[in-house]
Image: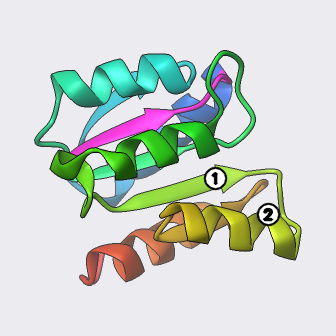
Amino acid sequence: MKIIVVDDSTTMRRIIKNTLARIGDMEVYEGENGIDGWNVLNQNADAGMLITDWNMPDMNGLELVTKVRADPRFENLPIIMITTEGGKAQVITALKAGVNNYIVKPFTPDVLREKLSAVLGVSL
């Protein structure tokens, strides 16, 4: 499965990519911000999931989610937001924008696995 990971932190992208590699056979494509993530998604429109941070320069994750959900090609694309924004209001805002699940940093590999399983409806 192709997964797009968008985070302005190189370290966080590496952590997520390494975790996904341990979970299963996943092709991971990376973006450094929302604009970059949007471009990567368009180049890989058959992606099976988008994982994005919220706080990024140029285009934040919430703006990216809104843009993705406005495009009919991606209306059913599973999206997980991984962010430091852990308040109830932020979670609600993200879910209303179209995020399927939400992970607060810091997180463990098991949490990412559980959220992926929940969003994809399969056991990983």
User: Quarter-wise, where is residue 59 in the image?
Assistant: top right
Residue 35 picture location, percent across and down: 48, 19
Q: Is residue 72 left or right of residue 68?
A: left
Q: Which residues are magenta?
A: 1-9
Q: Amino acid at mark 2?
A: Gln
- Is residue 1 among what the camera can see? no
Callout in the foreground (1, 2): 2
Q: Is residue 117 left or right of residue 6?
A: left
Q: Looking at the image, which is closer to me, 108 or 53?
A: 53
The C terminus lies in quadrant: bottom left
Q: Which mark, by number, is residue 121?
A: none
Residue 65 picture location, percent across and down: 49, 47
Q: Which mark, by number, is residue 90?
A: 2
Figure check: 19 above or below 99: above
Q: Mark 1 Cα within 10 Å, few/some/many (few <14, many 20+)?
A: many
Mark sitting earlier along the chain (1/2): 1
Task: Give the residue pinned by disc 1.
Answer: 82
